[in-house]
Image (cartoon, rainbow, N blue to C red):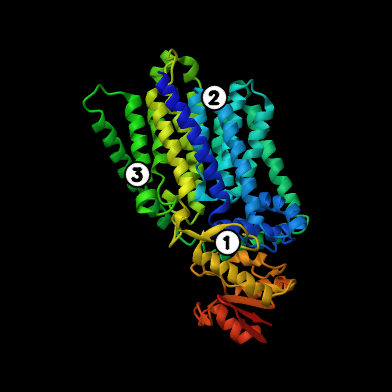
Amino acid sequence: MRNKTRLLNILNILLIILTILAALKMLFFGLGLDEEYQVVMAYRNARGDRLFLDMWEPHQSSAFLCSLLMKPYLKLLGTTGVVLYLRVWGTFFHLFISLYLYMVLKAFVRKEYARLLAFIYFNTIPKLIILPEFGIMQVWFYTLLSLFLIRYYTDGRKVRYLVLAALAFALNVLSYPSCVILFPFLLLSLFRFSGREKWRDMGIFTLVCTLCGAGYLGILFTYTDPKELVNTLSHILSGDITHSLSLREKLLSWLRDILRLSVLWAGCRLFALVFSIHKKPDAAKTYCLTLMAACGIVLFYWGVLKVGYPPMHIHLATAAAAGLIARAKARKIQKEAASKAENIPLFLHATTGAILSLLAVAYLTDLNLMESIPHAMPAAIYGTVLLILTLEQKETRKPSGWLLVMLTAWAFTAVFGKGYTLRGGAGNEHVLQSGGIFREGPAAGIISNYIAAYIYNSDWEDWQTYLQDGDSVLIMVDQLSSLGTIQYLFKDVEISHFSIVNPTAYDERLPEYWTLYPEKFPNVIIVDCWYGELMTDPGNWMMRYIEDEFGYTQVNDGKYIRIYRK
């Protein structure tokens, strides 16, 4: 017994140390397109560009948090190091929510389980982006929403928790507008659990959400009007080329991913059954072995195949499935431990809501279903709580060994993914490929692969040579090139494109945008060009516009960019 206790203590200490190291890695390693997109979008808003008027980005409603955090930093320090600054804030938010998750869950499951689930939550990062980006913000606010509702129904029905849940839902919708589909589901949950107070609770929740929506529209209508807002929304929808799949194509993609997930899950389940074939079947052992096998698959993808973080998250799907399957046995647990069983429906609804959130995200995102699974991370957490409530009997004095082993294995898997892997792409799959550092500018202090860092630093130097504060600049990016929109923060310049999402459209909509907002007309256009060799199609619309209509008077070649100046 003492040896087991000592081993658990050692593992806990090791988990804490590795978690700290993984958090530091998230602060200092890698810079991806979506992170760059969120930073530049928030920067536009922080320096005065108006939401749904000057800005036509499809995710701009999520810019509020980064924009608020940026404003004091920009006034004090400018843009240098702003990415690292936002990552520190994101880490703080994620830690706070993880601790709050622990505080809530320990009232329903043993502290050992709640602690490990909090570690798992803290070490699971959607898209491996820790600054307040729309993906992780959606997870944060859904987690808070569900935890506030759980507290409301289990802690004396204090109205403040219901109000906080409604506020969290409003922020969830701002982070990912398609999550508005959760509203009827949440009303159904209130109807289900509030009993005699159901109409009052539904009314309070609806009123708070309505006031939040009206307040947001009121802010927008201080500088625009309904007709202009509708026109801008039309421009946003027509100008977004990042989500070009039809509903049919998305459904086919989802079906392929669901089939792949099903095959992998069946393999994990078969492994668990074969492993315990010589012994009496044990539900806890079978579920735990299934999830541990899923963790093994994930580690194989991350550590051996080295495909980067996003492509494989079967362990999260397996955890959610385990809880939902275990729910079918809830009648048995109701007889043995009614005090625990009465909480099962709450966590079932929380799990279901997280799955609906995944569908909302998957509909709008350009990621496939497998890569989107971390957006339903709360489903994995709550599904595991369902599993524990089903398996743990009231009279059990000690935690289940199998559950502890499974949660520990899952926690270390999450730490490995967070601490070792990167977003993916050529030469960007894991931290050992990192050999350069961004020396100046918004990403100063960030470690990346050698060539990415070299190009970034070279472009920074060229900006200091050829561009001036006050220039109106258009950067032509196409996702595949080395040129990124983060360069808009290299100088105090006006951003001349209607949308800084990468990739974005370069066509007749640009002159239309400049007609609407003449102050946005560029006097500088930057294209991808390596040592004098143009890296974009000279026959595309943008290059034809530069040659035929822009009227440039000066051309300068940096190492990796070409600057046309009017």
- Give the answer, above or below, for where 548 lies relative to 232: below
The answer to whether the residues at label 1 and label 2 have Cβ atoms under 8 Å apart is: no
The tag on residue 106 is: 2
Residue situated in front as seen by the camera: 521 or 102: 102
Q: Which residue is mark 3?
A: 297
- Give the answer, above or below, for where 455 lies relative to 18: below
- Give the answer, above or below, for where 71 lies relative to 295: below
Give the residue displayed 66% in from the left and 34% down from the top. Answer: 164
Left-right relation of 252 to 175: left
Corner quadrant of residue 429: bottom left
Visible residue check, residue 87:
yes
Q: CA distance from mark 1 to mark 2?
A: 44 Å
Q: Which residue is mark 1?
A: 237
Residue situated in front as seen by the camera: 524 or 365: 524
Give the residue displayed 56% in from the left and 25% down from the top. Answer: 193
Given this view, does label 1 or label 2 mark the residue nearer the observer? 2
